[in-house]
Image: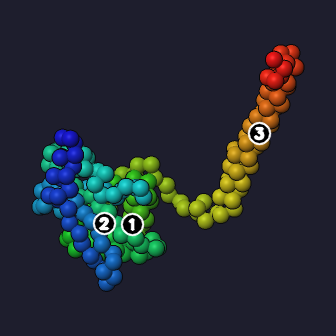
Amino acid sequence: MQFENLLNAFLVSLSTQIIVDDDDSKVWSIYDAGPKNIRCPIIFLPPVSGTADVFFQQILALTGWGYRVISLQYPVYWDLLEFCDGFRKLLDHLQLDKIHLFGASLGGFLAQKFAEYTHKSPRVHSLILCNSFSDTSIFNQTWTANRYWWYVCTVQIIVPLKILMLCVQSYLRRFDQYVDELLSSHGTVNDN
């Protein structure tokens, strides 16, 4: 219960939503904690299965040490350039010229791409990656997915089911034989 109270207090006190694009559906949710006079904060980009609040314990610890920490949930962008441009606009809105960028999984991939995007006028002072990837070309290879699911369906599902059915059929045949033997040795119920 204490954990939930701490999380709820955190979420309520620090949550802000910002729209920086012309498209009003692109809403950035941010948690900005620590001294606002720090102009080079640590920014957390969450994994695809997480939101900005997944880093709340790190935010609490780092702000306790005097750091400014921003955790954000990015809106849906359908290409990297659009994301990078939206993220740049967010940093402009927050008046941040340099940042330390931490990214987990998809957040790490996006952090790398933003660092590449701004390489001519660098905005990323440091980059910290956690369980990230640098190349997405494997995701474009749909043949691998087809082959994987064929393998899963045939080898891991259908074959074991066939083996199970053979075992059950064999067991039922032996059970029928046992019942027949029992009935023939003891007579039928109506033989009394």
The residue that label 2 is drawn on is: 123
Asked which quadrant contains residue 139, the reply is bottom right
Q: Is residue 107 left or right of residue 175?
A: left
The x, y position of residue 41, in whole percent, is: 22, 58
Asked which quadrant contains residue 38, the reply is bottom left
Q: Residue at x 33, y 77 (%)?
A: 25
Relative height, residue 116 to residue 81 (above, below):
above
Q: Which type of secondary structure does the marked residue at label 2 adopt?
A: loop
- In the image shown, does 175 or 145 lie closer to the viewer? 175
> Which of the numbered marks, if any, corresponds to residue 114?
1
Q: Residue at x 30, y 66 (%)?
A: 123
Q: Earlier in the sequence, mark 2 or mark 3?
A: 2
Residue 7 in sight in this render: yes
Q: Residue furthest right?
A: 184
Q: Which type of secondary structure does the marked residue at label 1 adopt?
A: helix
Q: Is residue 143 left or right of residue 107?
A: right
